[in-house]
Image: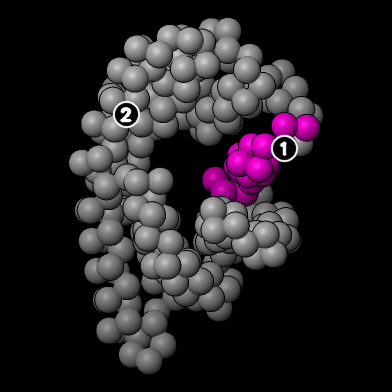
Amino acid sequence: AYLAETEMQRSHLDRAIKICREAIEQGSRWGGACPLPYTANAHVVLGELMYEQNDLKAAAKNLTEGIKLAEASFNWTFVLKGCLFMAQLSQAQGDLEATNRYIQRVNDIAPRVPHSREGRQEPTWKIRMALRRNDLAATSDWSRRVENILPLSHLPVYQQEYDYLTLIRVRLAKNELKDLSANLDGVIKIAQAQDRTGVVIEALILKALVGERSGQLASAVTTLDQALSLAEPSGYIR
């Protein structure tokens, strides 16, 4: 699963899917009627990949199976990861009840794994969920707190990137566009040098939105074309 996540960061989605499916097949073969617990990780990552490819039915199936197997082996990091994506998926499907149910599970599980990547990112993930429902009021306290330690004028290290791009999303939602394009150029340059195409795509899309909001339509279209030229061959749809 960790190898698949690395391939996903590089936007090698087909390779990542192949790795996950091979791990699931092997774990099921060796475990017989009871799949080996480590296949939980592969199911959760495969669910994330299916979500990115907009196959929500397959995503839900794999995430649900991954959560069940992770719970059975007390693998709380992957329970949390699965619930994070199930909440996102449920929100995308307009299922408010399921969304709230998974958000509550996230609230319950996150304190168990505070030092995992998912545990550290959980507060920021909630901000992204709030932005999806256009709840800007929910972002105010978080934005002030993060900007005190991570001003947009300073490029983030890898561990800060998720927060940094979320802060840019908040600024964009509030139509506070000053310097955002230049900030995003810095992220794009670093991610390109590290072959992290997924982040490049995200930053390019945000830059295109900044250009569109700024009235620079021709530049926005060019930037969006760059993002699509990277996303399409990799299999990204959402």
Residue at screen point 62% across, 26% down: 173
Indicate the position of residue 115 as horizontal and vertical percent values.
Answer: 61, 47
**Horizontal side, residue 132 vs residue 223: left or right:** right
Near-viewer residue (151 or 115): 151
**Image coloring type:** one colour
Which amino acid, by three-letter code, is at mark 2? Ala
The one nearer the camera, 202 or 222, is: 222
Q: Range of the magenta residues?
A: 115-137
- Return the residue nearer the eye: 139 or 108: 139
Relative to 119, say whether 196 is above or below. above
Q: Can residue 114 be seen? A: yes
Mark drawn on residue 187: none
Residue at the extreme bottom of the image, as rendered: 33
Disc assigned to residue 135: 1
Q: How crowded is mark 2: few (under 14 residues within 10 Å), some or many (20 or more)?
A: many
Q: Mark 2 points at which residue?
A: 227
- Amino acid at dot 1: Asp
Q: Mark 2 and 1 residues: CB-CB less than 8 Å, in contact?
A: no
Give the image location of residue 211, x and y in percent.
45, 14
Q: Is 220 situated above or below 228?
A: above
Question: Could you tell me which residue is drawn at 54 percent across and 58 percent down?
Answer: 93
Look at the image and say whether residue 226 sits in the magenta stretch. Answer: no
Q: Marks 2/1: CA distance?
A: 27 Å
Q: Which of marks 2 and 1 is nearer the N terminus?
A: 1
Query: Badge 1, how many Cα within 10 Å: few under 14, some, many 20+?
Result: some
Q: Is residue 18 above or below residue 143?
A: below
Q: What element carries label 1?
A: loop
Tag 2 secondary structure = helix
Q: In this view, does 180 lie above or below 201?
A: above
